[in-house]
Image: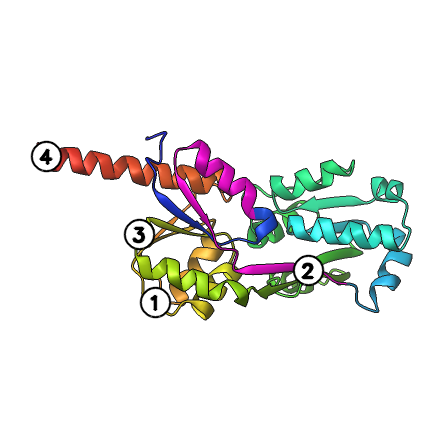
Amino acid sequence: MSTSLDGRKILITREENQAKEFTERVIQYGGTPIETPLLKISCIDHDESRHYFRNINKYSWIFFTSANGVKCFFQLADKYKVDIELFQHIHLAAVGHKTENYLKKIGLIADFIPSIYNADVMADEFLKKYKETDSILLVRGNRSRDVLPVELSKQELTFDSIEVYETSYNYEIAESLNNILLQNTLDFITFTSPSTVEAFVEMANVNIDTICVCIGTTTENRARELGFTSIITAKEFTIEGMLACILQYVSSERIDYHDKKH
């Protein structure tokens, strides 16, 4: 497999604060990142949030399905003066290592991480391992999928949901996005969530046939539903997995080119 992106132009569509790491990795591998953050993430505090934090001791598990969820949840915990030590006595579930790392930053450890980083596998593996679990708190955003609530309901488990962040489209970037697409010089477009795909379709006024790189099967499925056909998907549902996927594609391009010459 190639270890260089050879200057390939890669559109990074994830939210601005999360795009930096992706950009740095693309540069390290010799690619040319183009940041176009299609989403905005905002922490929110609903009226009912106070109730959940006042009764945090009643939960045996708290589920985090994104790093944004961790960040915004503990902002609220601080606002409502919940002692961080309380969370040492509650089991924590994280959808993947990125989310787990956010927990580690505040001194907490995830007790459960699924083998594949998406909500479907998270629900399946958790319910097989912890069949009798009750009193679960799901930390969610306004666009979070309903996989966990549906599966927990099927098992008749008791759970609550707290919405701590809001994902919205960054319409301010639309003109810049379309100018980039009109130049028709991109090699790859990266999508790190179904929401980034939806935002792209909402804002793009240019038909493209650029290869789309999806972080996982959930994002890939949404891309196909919205009409994308040239798609490659990471085997490991992480940024590193996406880069490995791109590098493998670049490597195969070189092999094809070499074969044609000979």
The label shown at residue 206 is 1
Q: Name the residue type under label 1.
A: Val
- The span picked out in magenta is 19-44
Q: Which comes sooner in the sequence, label 4 or label 2?
A: 2
Q: Which comes sooner in the sequence, label 1 or label 4?
A: 1
In terms of depth relative to the viewer, which is nearer, 251 or 207? 207
Percent from the top left, x then y, of residue 95? 62, 47
Percent from the top left, x then y, of residue 238? 51, 42
Q: Which comes sooner in the sequence, label 2 or label 3?
A: 2
Of badges 1 and 4, the one in the foreground is: 1
Is residue 191 rendered to the left or right of residue 59?
left
Instruction: Tell me the distance, in whole angstroms, between the alpha carbons under discs 3 and 4.
Output: 24 Å
The label shown at residue 185 is 3
Color encoding of the figure: rainbow
Q: Is residue 209 above or below residue 246?
A: below
Q: Name the residue type under label 3.
A: Thr
Of badges 3 and 4, the one in the foreground is: 3
Q: Is residue 184 above or below residue 10?
A: below
